[in-house]
């Protein structure tokens, strides 16, 4: 899965949590979940659960704490996918 | 401050009607909302019948966002939000996403427990070492105040937002708490009400206590029999009722429809002393509660036209009537009419008081007394106390002026509210 594909999948995941339709439509690496998409911080844990399910990966607490932007999230997903592939 | 407090909106989510129009029609006709529950039968309950509001997914989705619906597993919150929002709209308020909260409006919306199915799911996840999978939806659905939190978020309420809990007196108490808040000038409008979850995990404890009937599993609609010789325990129910209370000044200023007035009331406890226990009422406390309610409302016993009792359909119904009789000290021939809604909807636990108050206010507003169903074999201990005329079994259409509503709960606690028809 390349970066663009991951961002598209993320877009589908975060969509229900945001009412900022225009920011969702223009989602890119620099998008910040809280500042740009106005996602309630309590829902970030739900987004992580959805990501785990979608990509079949497990996200540890340290990684979770970093996942506040599309860029950081994409990097962590990529790392976990690679780690899975290496097993 | 000593504001007069009126009722300007009603909402209900009951086993025999989930809109005020449907519910009004059902209570006039004596339509039962008690049905056989396959899940209770599968779980070997003694009582396999119950009252549960019937709601389509489509209806529910009118009140919740798709995101809220995703992990929603709290029937009490669903019922409470539907009854609460319907009452708010009925009072003529728009539900809008305004920037500033309405500082003069609040809610007291009671419950016994919240989201018991959600709680069960969460507990199973935790025990399966999957705590992470709980996500963010467990706390907001299982905290007791979840229902008032959901309602206030949807309405933008900026005054007191709280959930009271006093067993089966919860609903009546919520109205008195909201009433006090407005009467003392601390709020202009309060959404009062209460809700109760459905299902085996909320009803199981009562089934195990053997306080529910097991004799009518084959005839659900006949199962809930307040005041009957064959009353053999209550039928569990669920749902929510809600009333918008408002200062008379505010209601008049915005030309609101006024259903009736809350004249006052009283709450007390028997302290589990004398005959009172955790589960049985101290009769002295019940009588004092009724008398203090009359005094607080500034009325005399003979002015009461209708009593909406607690009357759950146990052998204790006669004992309750005796308490009313002692408290009111009225001659048998002048005893008020007595109503029990539980014949139609069962005992909706924490929601019983509020649903029954909605029924009471409808009676005052429209001028009728709904029929008491399933007491064709009236308990002789009751007919020895009051005239059978006081217990109508068919609809009576006549204006009524004052109605007394009481609810009694585990913990030996009592609540009595006095409603009056509003005459401008």
Image (cartoon, grey):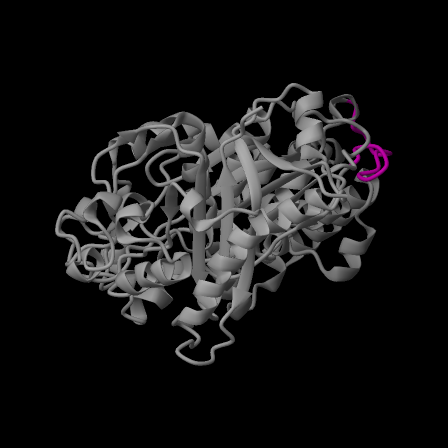
Residue A29 located within the stretch drawn in magenta: yes
For the N terminus of chain B, which image quadrant? top right
The residue that appears at 81% across and 31% down in the rendered structure is B100
Classify B368 as above or below B51: above
Query: What percent of the width, then of the height, locates residue B280?
Result: 38, 72
Above or below B316: residue B416:
above
In the image, residue B384 sits, relative to residue B103, either above or below, namely below
Which residues are drawn in magenta? A26-38
Left or right, B178 with reference to B33: right
**Taking B366 as reference, is B223 left or right?**
left
Q: Which of B2 and A29 is in front in this view?
A: B2
At which x and y percent is residue B123?
Answer: 51, 65
Write the residue at 71% across / 28% down: B250
B79 or B365: nearer the viewer: B365
Check the picture and name the quadrant holding the C terminus of chain B: top right
Estimate the x, y position of residue B350 in percent, counting from the top left: 46, 54
Q: Can the viewer see residue B292?
A: yes
Relative to A58, B341 lies left or right: left
- Left or right relative to B5: residue B116: left
* Residue B255 lies in quadrant: top right
Q: Main secondary structure of the magenta part?
A: loop
Residue located farthest toward the bottom when viewing the structure as drawn:
B274
Whether residue B73 is visible, yes or no, is no
């Amino acid at each position: 899965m390349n970066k663009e594909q991951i961002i598209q999948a993320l877009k589908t995941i975060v969509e229900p949590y945001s009412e900022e339709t225009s920011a969702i439509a223009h989602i890119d690496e620099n998008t910040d979940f809280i500042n740009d998409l106005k996602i309630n911080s309590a829902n970030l844990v739900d987004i992580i659960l959805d990501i785990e399910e979608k990509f079949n990966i497990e996200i540890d607490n340290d990684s979770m704490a970093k996942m506040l932007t599309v860029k950081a999230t994409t990097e962590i997903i990529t790392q976990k996918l690679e780690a899975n592939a290496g097993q | 401050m000593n504001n007069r407090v009126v009722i300007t909106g009603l909402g209900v989510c009951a086993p025999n009607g989930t809109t005020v129009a449907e519910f009004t029609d059902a209570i006039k006709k004596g339509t039962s909302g008690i049905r056989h529950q396959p899940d209770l039968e599968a779980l070997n309950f003694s009582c396999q019948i119950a009252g549960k509001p019937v709601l389509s997914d489509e209806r529910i989705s009118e009140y919740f966002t798709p995101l809220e619906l995703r992990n929603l597993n709290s029937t009490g919150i669903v019922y409470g939000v539907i009854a609460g929002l319907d009452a708010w709209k009925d009072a003529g308020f728009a539900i809008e996403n305004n920037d500033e909260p309405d500082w003069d409006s609040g809610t007291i919306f009671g419950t016994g427990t919240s989201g018991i199915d959600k709680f069960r799911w969460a507990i199973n996840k935790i025990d399966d070492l999957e705590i992470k999978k709980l996500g963010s939806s467990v706390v907001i659905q299982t905290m007791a105040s979840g229902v008032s939190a959901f309602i206030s978020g949807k309405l933008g309420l900026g005054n007191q937002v709280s959930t009271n809990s006093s067993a089966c007196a919860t609903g009546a108490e919520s109205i008195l708490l909201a009433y006090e808040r407005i009467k003392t000038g601390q709020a202009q409008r309060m959404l009062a009400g209460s809700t109760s979850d459905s299902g085996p995990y909320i009803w199981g404890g009562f089934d195990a206590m053997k306080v529910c009937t097991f004799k009518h599993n084959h005839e659900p609609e006949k199962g809930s029999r307040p005041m009957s010789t064959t009353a053999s325990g209550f039928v569990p129910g669920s749902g929510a009722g809600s009333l918008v209370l408002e200062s008379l000044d505010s209601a008049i200023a915005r030309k609101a429809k006024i259903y009736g007035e809350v004249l006052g009331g009283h709450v007390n406890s028997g302290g589990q002393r004398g005959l009172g226990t955790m589960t049985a009422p101290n009769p002295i406390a019940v009588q004092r509660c009724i008398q203090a309610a009359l005094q607080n409302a500034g009325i005399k016993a003979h002015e009461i036209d209708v009593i909406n009792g607690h009357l759950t359909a146990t052998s204790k119904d006669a004992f309750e009537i005796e308490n009313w009789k002692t408290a009111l000290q009225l001659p048998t021939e002048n005893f008020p009419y007595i109503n029990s809604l539980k014949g139609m909807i069962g005992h909706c636990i924490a929601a019983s008081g509020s649903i029954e108050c909605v029924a009471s206010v409808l009676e005052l507003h429209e001028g009728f007394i709904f029929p008491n169903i399933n007491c064709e074999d009236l308990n002789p201990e009751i007919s020895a106390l009051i005239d059978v005329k006081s217990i109508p079994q068919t609809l009576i259409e006549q204006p009524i002026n004052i109605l007394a509503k009481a609810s009694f709960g585990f913990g030996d606690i009592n609540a009595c509210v006095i409603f009056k028809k509003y005459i401008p």
